[in-house]
């Protein structure tokens, strides 16, 4: 489904319409080796995430929330347990299969924006599409639609240095959306933004879930940011507490 369809999507894809969860986590454990010491980042976590949810992962530093986000997004692999996304146990995919899966199914939004400074907003958003076989005309259509969706259709030729931090983060959200992923994952997306810009970015993420049926998973330590989600999950020392 192209991004244009996402922009036109209605609330008919709200949480609960799907037959089952889009993410199913069972007994997930992640242990890191630090010298001679094993550090348990996640300990036997079980969790379901429904299609169209805006799930917020909260907890103090070192609680495992970013680790869980990275495992769900296929950035890291669990030590043990089962992790299914859209019915696929992604922990069993090869490295090349996992890379292909990420490119097709996950859009990433990070605290630091990660925009290429010498590229325009249009060119930054287009980057994920360069890994596909789409022609130039189709790429242009998708990029324009994604930028329009985040309210930056008139800024497509601007460089990052010509935009505010809030506008840069909206470009990053457009880049995350342009491939029409099943999941949008956001790791402290408002950490570098002022209050007004943070509200704008969070409003876009909320709209993606509420109005367009996208599944959004966000890590934050900010209760005000967490309030934009449809559900909050708390972690403490690698375990779910609520």
Image (tube, rainbow, N blue to C red):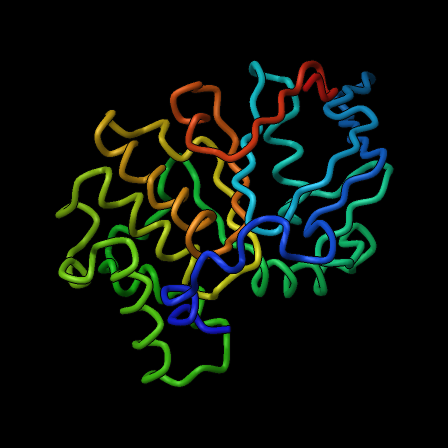
User: What residue sits 45% from the left and 73% below the top?
Assistant: 2
Name the residue rendered at 29%, 65% in the picture: 123
Residue 37 in percent (x, y) is at: 81, 16
Above or below for 37 versus 57: above
The image quadrant of residue 222 is top left
| Frontmost residue, 240 versus 172 | 240
Q: Residue at x 40, y 85 (%)?
A: 135
Q: Residue 145 lies in what quarter of the image? A: bottom left
Say if 167 sits above or below 112 in the image.
below
Instruction: Give how far across and how far down residue 220 sits, in percent.
Output: 48, 26
- Look at the picture and state if 241 lies above or below 130: above
Q: Position of residue 150 (x, y in %)?
A: 28, 53
The image shows residue 146 at horizontal and vertical percentages of 33, 63
**Residue 230 left/right relative to 44:** left
- Residue at 31% x, 77% y: name it: 141
155 horizontally vs 31: left or right: left
Q: Nearer the viewer, residue 16 or 118?
A: 16
User: Which quadrant does the C terminus fall into?
Assistant: top right
């Amino acid at each position: 489904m192209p991004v244009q369809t996402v922009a036109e999507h209605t609330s008919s894809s709200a949480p609960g319409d799907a037959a089952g969860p889009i993410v199913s986590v069972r007994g997930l454990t992640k242990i890191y080796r630090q010298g001679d010491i094993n550090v348990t980042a996640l300990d036997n976590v079980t969790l379901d995430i429904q299609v169209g949810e805006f799930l917020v992962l909260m907890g103090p530093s070192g609680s495992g929330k970013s680790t869980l986000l990275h495992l769900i997004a296929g950035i890291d692999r669990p030590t043990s347990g089962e992790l299914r996304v859209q019915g696929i146990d992604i922990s069993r995919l090869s490295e090349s299969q996992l890379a292909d899966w990420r490119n097709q199914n996950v859009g990433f939004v990070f605290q630091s924006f990660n925009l290429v400074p010498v590229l325009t907003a249009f060119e930054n958003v287009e980057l994920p599409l360069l890994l596909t076989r789409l022609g130039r005309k189709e790429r242009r259509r998708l990029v324009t639609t994604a930028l329009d969706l985040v309210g930056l259709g008139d800024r497509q030729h601007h460089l990052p240095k010509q935009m505010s931090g809030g506008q840069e983060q909206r470009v990053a959200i457009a880049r995350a959306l342009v491939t029409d992923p099943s999941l949008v994952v956001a790791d402290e997306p408002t950490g570098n933004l002022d209050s007004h810009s943070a509200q704008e970015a969070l409003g876009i993420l909320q709209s993606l879930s509420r109005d367009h049926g996208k599944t959004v998973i966000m890590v934050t330590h900010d209760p005000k940011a967490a309030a934009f989600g449809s559900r909050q999950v708390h972690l403490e020392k690698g375990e779910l507490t609520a």
